[in-house]
Image (tube, rainbow, N blue to C red):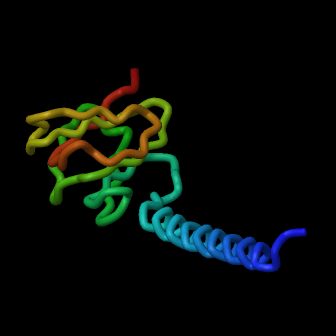
Amino acid sequence: MLPRNANLRTIAATATTTAALAGLAVLGTGTANAAAWPSLQPGAALYTGTNGTGAVLNPDLGDLGTCHTTAEPVRSIQIVNGSASVLLYSGADCTGNAWASGTLTQSNLPEAKLSYRVVTAR
């Protein structure tokens, strides 16, 4: 037979584990909500904040090749389109370092971008 205090140790260990898991669940939920992106929608969206936050600019995906300088730096992008992608540039007037989106993208940019152009997907 187990000593009487063995049951108390088991109960204490179970309670500690349960409390720790509950704390992780709450922490995990808060972290997931803080980093949640807007739901994917057909088209493109450029955001001034990371993770799809801040002001939104919706490029016209039919306006191929035209360079557009943004009013504010862009820090994240979301695009759902089978025929066009977006090239983003670190400088105004489509100058500086370029970054290409692809046709299905949800990404924070490696650096703030100041201009863009829509191109045909390859």
Residue at the extreme top of the image, as rendered: 122
Quarter holding residue 115: top left
**Residue under the image location 62 percent in, 74 percent down:** 16
68 lies above or below 47: above
Quarter holding residue 101: top left
40 lies above or below 120: below
* Foreground residue among 35 and 57: 35
Q: Is residue 80 left or right of residue 4?
A: left
Q: Is residue 65 left or right of residue 80?
A: left
**Residue under the image location 76 percent in, 78 percent down:** 5
**Residue under the image location 9 percent in, 35 percent down:** 96
Percent coordinates x, y for residue 26 in the rendering:
55, 72
* Foreground residue among 51 and 90: 51
12 lies above or below 104: below
Percent coordinates x, y for residue 23 in the rendering:
55, 73
82 lies above or below 112: above
Residue at the extreme right of the image, as rendered: 1
Percent coordinates x, y for residue 28 in the rendering:
52, 64
* Foreground residue among 38 and 3: 3
What is the tally of numbered marks visible in this picture? 0
Q: Quadrant of the N terminus?
A: bottom right
Percent coordinates x, y for residue 77 in the rendering:
35, 48
**Residue under the image location 40 percent in, 20 percent down:** 122
